[in-house]
Image (spheres, helix red, strand yellow):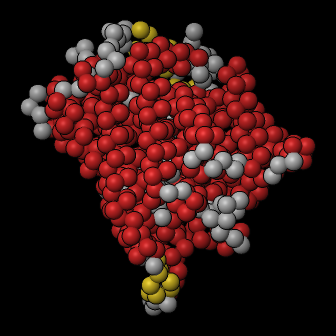
Amino acid sequence: MDPVTVALAVLLSALSCLLYIFIGILPGTDETATMAPIALTLLLAGVDPLLVLVWFVASIAAFKMADSIPVALAGIPGGVMAVPQVPDALVAKEHGLADTVLRKGIASSAVGQFVALVVALALSYQLMPAGEWLRTADTVLGVKVARWFWLVLAGVVVLALTSRSRWVALLSVPSFALLIQGLRSVYGRPIYISFFLGITIGPLMFDLLSMLHRELRRSYTRRGFKEVRLVRVGRISLNPLRILTKEELAHSTLWSAITSVLATVMSPVGLTILIGDLLREGSRDRVKGAVLAYTVRDAIKNATYVGGTLIPLLVIGQPTGPMAAGPAMPFFTKLDSLGMTPRDYIVSRYDYVTIVISLLLASAIAFLIAYPLLVRYSRSITLAVFRRVPAEALYGLFIAIVIMLAYYDAKVAGVFGTLVVSLVSGALWRLGVSLGVLFMTLVAAPTLVALLTALPL
Amino acid sequence: MESDEELYELYGEYVSLRELGICTAVSTALAMLFFYIAPSVAGLLNVAASGLSITLGAVGATVGFAISLFLARVKREVREV
């Protein structure tokens, strides 16, 4: 890497970190809706894909560190991944331990990020030869099927079975694949970005349009302003080694390593719920169990995001899990300006050492900025964001970016295609289908529909 | 200060549909305006229009966000306990 690229990597990591601290603290900011459009915008704007990956990894570090801060201070999740931490935080808050979980969460986020980086990068290096085998295509029912497709299919079935409504989720897989391929045949070309964005904003659009319906609107109506009770915190040490106990450090390290690999095909939020609940239920002391669960969940959040992005990106070359097929999807999307996917560009243009150094650098810079800032000023930042930033301004910004990218992808038809996909996605999400199922179906749709139509039934 | 307007809960936040509509319209209009003027700017700078369209569009949306901060009211009542 030349000095200019290194300087750009440092600058982008720092900018990403500052932006995602702010986004992370804001309540209701969905990870895919906020991370993917910005990464996609940078890629489409012509920024080097490795630098966008640097931006992305720094954003994971800052976002996942910051989104639990409003949970600890006010019991409000800053993002979808922080939702499982709410019950633990409420128990801690009842016992006056809000500042304890706040600092433990921030410290374990750092542990999760670096453990996952080391594990994912080391494992990816060892598994790279398997990538070629996975990309080989076999003929099934007269259809060319790449071997990674079966991994995606297995992942989507597992994810559907772990959805809140497993039968609806299973039924939605072929149906949603047909909707996607049907729209693509109308457009006459393999549109991707509009559909991806449609799923991303599905829950938001479905709720918004429901509010326009007189009967449905009633369930959303609220009187007065939303009351947020923010607890006070004491002075917190900057030394992370003083923050975590040996047990918390051991659990955070162990589960970060394991879940970073499992996130290749499994849901990050599912793993955060599963492992945290196991630890909480395994403790005889309710408060101690809640603090341990909260702490380890914070490490798992970072670990699953890092592992779920890097292993599919470096080894398989296809988005095999909900993380890769969700927030990290822009790296697997073929771009006309590159003539290939950003993923292919990164692995073909840069050697492994450069990729490793870039990602470690991004995480180090993100933590050098975010860690002291959040440990020292988390309460003041949260207070400022809660008092100064209206939710409407942020939602308006993301809807505008989605409309622009959908228009860029397929003009006015792209905007309406996004609307159709978002409504179907939002309705399925309401029925208990994980959005990860829909993201992975989007990836599998061409082969899945080809196989469905080739069935002798 | 309480609001007389009917508010709706969206993603855990209370929003006014009127203000959300205004903020979205402002950000979208600016994003599309910047998106559309990008080829002219690219011609002046002698760079590829496609990448610049997205960049300027995102800049437009961000300017819209900054303006929206003054167009919508915060609907959270923060109590320090």
Dividing the picture into quarters, in which one does residue A10 lie?
top right
Q: Nearer the viewer, residue A104 or A200?
A: A104
Q: Nearer the viewer, residue A127 or A429?
A: A127
Residue A14 in the image, given as x and y percentages of width and height: 55, 31
Q: Residue at x 81, y 52 (%)?
A: B48
Q: Nearer the viewer, residue A306 or A163?
A: A306
Residue A346 in the image, given as x and y percentages of width and height: 55, 57
Residue A395 in the image, given as x and y percentages of width and height: 61, 35
Position of B6 relative to A142 (above/below): above
Q: Residue at x 50, y 85 (%)?
A: A143
Position of A346 relative to A116 (above/below): below
Number of dots carrying numbers? 0
Question: For the C terminus of chain A, which image quadrant?
Answer: bottom left
Residue A178 appears in view: yes
Q: Residue furthest front?
A: A2
Q: Residue at x 67, y 65 (%)?
A: A339
Is B32 placed left or right of A221 in the picture?
right
Q: Residue at x 53, y 47 (%)?
A: A53
Dividing the picture into quarters, in which one does residue A172 lie?
bottom left
Residue A227 appears in view: no
Position of A89 relative to B58 (above/below): above
Dividing the picture into quarters, in which one does residue A272 lie?
top left
Q: Nearer the viewer, residue B22 or A356?
A: A356
Residue A165 in the image, given as x and y percentages of width and height: 36, 56
Position of A357 relative to A101 (above/below): below
